Image: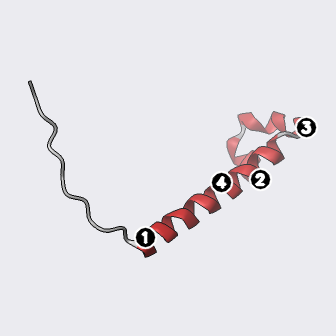
Amino acid sequence: MKRTVRLATLPLNKNKYDETRSVIGHYSDAKRVFVAHLRQTSLWRLLDRSKSFRD
């Protein structure tokens, strides 16, 4: 039977945690705007031309 080796964890790096949460927040905001923009069915024709849709 194999046993799992557990490594000791380091204390939480508060600055890195806050920075990671900030990046996640910005990503989810950008995705929310993108999805809201994509809901417009008139833009669906641009999906085949990714550069046109991006611009």
Q: Which residue is mark 3?
A: 42
Q: Residue furthest bottom?
A: 15
Q: Which residue is mark 4?
A: 28
For residue 16, which numbered disc appears in the image?
1
CA gap, disc 4 and disc 2: 9 Å
- Mark with earlier residue (4, 2): 4
> Is 19 on the left-hand or right-hand side of 13?
right
Badge 1 marks a residue whose secondary structure is helix
Are there few (<14), some (14-19), or many (20+) residues within 10 Å of tag 3?
few
Discs 3/1, front? 1
- In the rendered image of this protein, does residue 20 appear above or below residue 2? below
Contact flag, marks 3 and 2 (Cβ < 8 Å): no
CA gap, disc 3 and disc 2: 16 Å
Indicate the position of residue 12 as horizontal and vertical percent values. 36, 67
CA gap, disc 1 and disc 4: 18 Å
- Mark with earlier residue (1, 4): 1
CA gap, disc 4 and disc 3: 24 Å
Discs 4/3, front? 4
Amino acid type assigned to the residue bearing label 1 in the image: Lys
